[in-house]
Amino acid sequence: ASELRFETLPCVFPAESTLLEGLDHICSRAIELVRSGTRVLLLSDRNASEAMLPIPMAMATGAVHQALVAAGLRTLTGLAVEAGDCRDLHHAAVLIGYGAGAVCPWLMLETAMSLAPAGTEPATAEYKMLKALDAGLAKIMSKMGISVVDSYRGAHLFDILGLHSSVVERCF
């Protein structure tokens, strides 16, 4: 039986570096990982710190997706995202729209569990949050005439306002 090779790609960059250098690094690393056989790539900002700053996950997802498309490798791997900056339904929709096949809004889920009323199972709070996200995504997609996530993923259905064209071309 063959296994799908899974790798985590930290989406952080050194504080003394630039965001552009961080994007360059994660894109080249993603290409390297997929060429070496990775079939599920998890983009994660969980290890962010003062020394290692998080790359905004929408930028990271879009840039990695675009880099893999340009390298002719995008169909070889699935992209999953662990995003601490995913705090609402629309951010989750943006992550999917720019290429993520799965989104784990880890900080939002941990917050929901920590704020659960006394006597409530933390898993119940997490379940309710995920159920609300699922229902909200279905509503967003249905308003656009889309009925399945596969048609929404990587569709680039958003207008970009206020970002330089070089950023838009690179990430979105």
Image: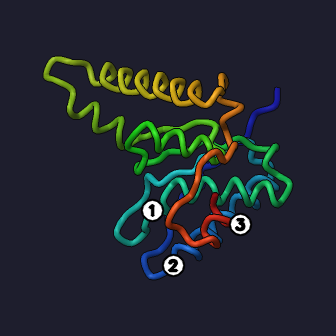
Q: Is residue 171 above or below residue 93?
A: below
In the rendered image, residue 128, in percent from the top left (x then y), is placed at 35, 21
Which label was assigned to residue 18?
2
Describe residue 171's horizontal placement relative to residue 139 as left or right: right
Q: Name the residue that disc number 1 marks.
A: 54
Image quadrant containing the C terminus = bottom right
Classify 39 as above or below 54: above
The mark total stands at 3
Q: Check disc 3 and give the amino acid type.
A: Ser
Would you place residue 158 above or below residue 119 in this image? below
Residue depicted at 37% across the width and 27% down the height: 129
The residue type indicated by label 2 comes to Thr
| 3 or 2: mark nearer the eye | 2
Q: In which quarter of the image is residue 130?
A: top left
- Judging from the image, what secondary structure is the residue with disc 2 in? loop
Could you tell me how far apart the alpha carbons at marks 1 and 2 are, in whole angstroms? 11 Å
Q: Are marks 1 and 2 in contact (CB under 8 Å)?
A: no
Q: Name the residue under label 3.
A: 28
Residue name at image x 83 percent, y 60 percent: 71
Assess disc 3: are there few (<14), some (14-19) or many (≥20) residues with their C-alpha within 10 Å of its C-alpha: few
- The image quarter containing residue 75 is top right
Q: Dot 1 surroundings within 10 Å: few (below 14), some, or many (20 or more)?
A: many
The single residue placed furthest to the right in the displayed view is: 72
Q: Earlier in the sequence, mark 1 or mark 3?
A: 3
Q: Which residue is drawn at 77% across and 52% down?
A: 34
In the rendered structure, which disc, 1 or 2, sits on the residue that comes first in sequence? 2
